[in-house]
Amino acid sequence: EDKVVQSPLSLVVHEGDTVTLNCSYEVTNFRSLLWYKQEKKAPTFLFMLTSSGIEKKSGRLSSILDKKELFSILNITATQTGDSAVYLCAANFGNEKLTFGTGTRLTIIP
Amino acid sequence: NAGVTQTPKFRILKIGQSMTLQCAQDMNHNYMYWYRQDPGMGLKLIYYSVGAGITDKGEVPNGYNVSRSTTEDFPLRLELAAPSQTSVYFCASSPRGRNNQPQHFGDGTRLSIL
């Protein structure tokens, strides 16, 4: 069964800390791994990773994929209160379908 | 710059009632999806469509129906609402193509069945 597992389920840190969110997957016909940020409403797209070892960066956020070990991490440096959200990881297994993990709820304390 | 538009935003139904959740996108995307998200959980795929006239079941299709008569619209129908269908429903779309493309989500419909 195609499965995506995220850890930790929740995380509380102080503003300015660096956090690492984990996503592992067991997906047949793997094509890509995607990270989304979900605040109160719609998930918003952060990164899509298809190749191992190539880091994607956007400001203080970065992500990398390891296709041999079947996992990805999302790093956020110098966290701000606006980073508080649920971070969703999803794997694409063909025909553009996505399998989502349960998410990591990140809370940044001022 | 509408993107994916879902209506209504909120709805309360009685057990056994029916309703249609509307979803429209103006990005000319061929692929459209319906997900449900229960509290503390990820998104579960209900139905998806790869183009007008084509629909397919996802992970949790029971109790739902869809149609795709145009590229823009992908309504989700609940025929006999049950308490287990209380959830937040998200519609999403993505472009056609062999290259991976991220899905774009609507703001969701919060549905309560009482």
Image: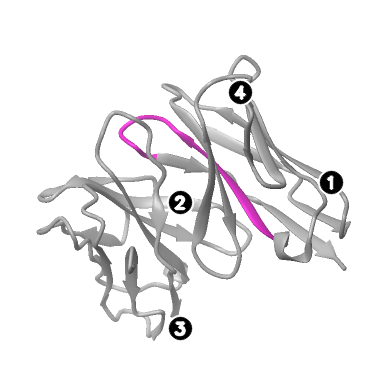
Q: Position of residue B54 (x, y in %)?
A: 14, 46
Q: Is residue B23 left or right of residue B101?
A: left
Horizontally, residue A70 falls left or right of residue B87, namely right
- What secondary structure is marked by label 1? loop
Q: Quadrant of residue B113?
A: bottom left
Kind of residue indicated by mark 1: Thr
Front-most of B14 and B42? B42
Q: CA distance from mark 1 to mark 4?
A: 20 Å
Q: Residue B114 occupies which quadrant of the picture?
A: bottom left
Please state which of the two labelled residues, at mark 2 or mark 4, is closer to the viewer: 4
Question: Who is closer to the viewer here, A68 or B12?
Answer: A68
Magenta residues span A85-97
* Residue identifier under label 2: B44
Q: Are marks 4 and 3 on the same chain?
A: no
On what subunit does the disc labeled 2 rest? B
- The residue indicated by pointer 4 is A54
**Labels 3 and 1 share a subunit:** no
Q: Is residue A1 visible?
A: no
Residue B114 tag number = 3
| Farthest-out residue, top | A68
| Subunit that carries the residue with mark 3 | B
